[in-house]
Image: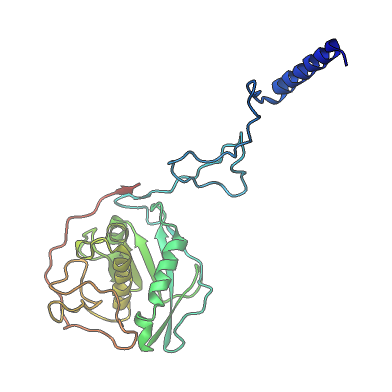
Amino acid sequence: MSTKVTRRRRSASAALLLVLALLTGCELPAAGQPPTEPVAAGPLPGGPPATTVPGRPTGVAGVTPTVVPAVPISYPATGGNRWSMAPAETAPARATGGRLLRYRVAVERDIRGLPVDDIATAISATVNDRRGWTAGGTWRLRRVGAGEPTDFTIYLATPGTRDTLCQDVPDGYTSCRNGDRVVLNVARWVQGVPGYGANLATYREYMVNHEVGHRLGFGHERCPRRGQPAPVMQQQTLGLHGCTASAWPYPDGKVRYRGPVGAYRDEIPRRAGAHSAH
């Protein structure tokens, strides 16, 4: 083959590569270097994990996944007294004996970041726990939905609406039971109390069990002895008085744990206001 023909073919090949590069947006390798392998798109090293919308392609060059930010918890000092109701639970209750009491779960609509389904799941897990009020065989507790016959309603309410529902001395701090209303103050649900420290999940269990205990007819109790667990009917929100924090009426699942009947004259902290947490 002549030198002229070889040069023409090389020139034609170079021209073809240039045209392909312009059409596809690829970068030509430098002279003397092999073509680079394709690199899969991914997060930058050290970057935070992203939550993406299901069904959107990820890890594909040229496609930016949609990031869904976490919803912060927030609520005003006083809400509008409008409610979202949880649906009825579908799983059968653990307890099979005793009087059936039906309850609803409602979350005030001004509370953001605490979906009613999540609150209902947490409450139902507490009331159906083997250490809860159904352990003694006296009651069965079942969550029903809106429009169904009910024996009481458990509300998660803003501090100001708590005062409206409780109809007691307004304090905006504590929770309460008023007739068939079991009212949980969202400020305590989110912030807890000093005696429980960072153990917020256990304090929420205490909140539910204490106020439901009032609906079942139990009054306040005191610490039986310093260093012992506090009875669930002790006003642990306001002070432990030498006892240790405890959330369950039947800690061993068999015997009701009690304290002396009575209450302390604890000072109630100042009224809670609006809250926003990120």
* x and y, in percent, of residue 176 in the image: 27, 68
**In the picture provided, is 57 more to the left or to the right than 109?**
right
Q: Is residue 178 visible?
A: no
Between 33 and 90, the one lying in front of the other is 33
For the point 43% across and 43% down, which residue is it? 48
* x and y, in percent, of residue 200 in the image: 30, 63
User: Which image quadrant: the N terminus?
Assistant: top right
For the point 54% across and 46% down, which residue is it? 52
**In the picture provided, is 59 more to the left or to the right than 50?**
right
Indicate whether 26 appears above or below 37. Answer: above
Indicate whether 50 appears above or below 11. Answer: below
Quadrant in which residue 239 is drawn: bottom left
Query: What's the colour scheme?
Result: rainbow
Indicate whether 187 appears above or below 63. Answer: below
**In the picture provided, is 52 more to the left or to the right than 35?**
left
Between 277 and 263, the one lying in front of the other is 277
For the point 32% across and 47% down, which residue is it? 276
Furthest residue toward top = 4
Q: Is residue 139 visible?
A: yes
* x and y, in percent, of residue 57 in the image: 62, 44
Indicate whether 41 appears above or below 14. Answer: below
For the point 12% across and 77% down, which residue is it? 226
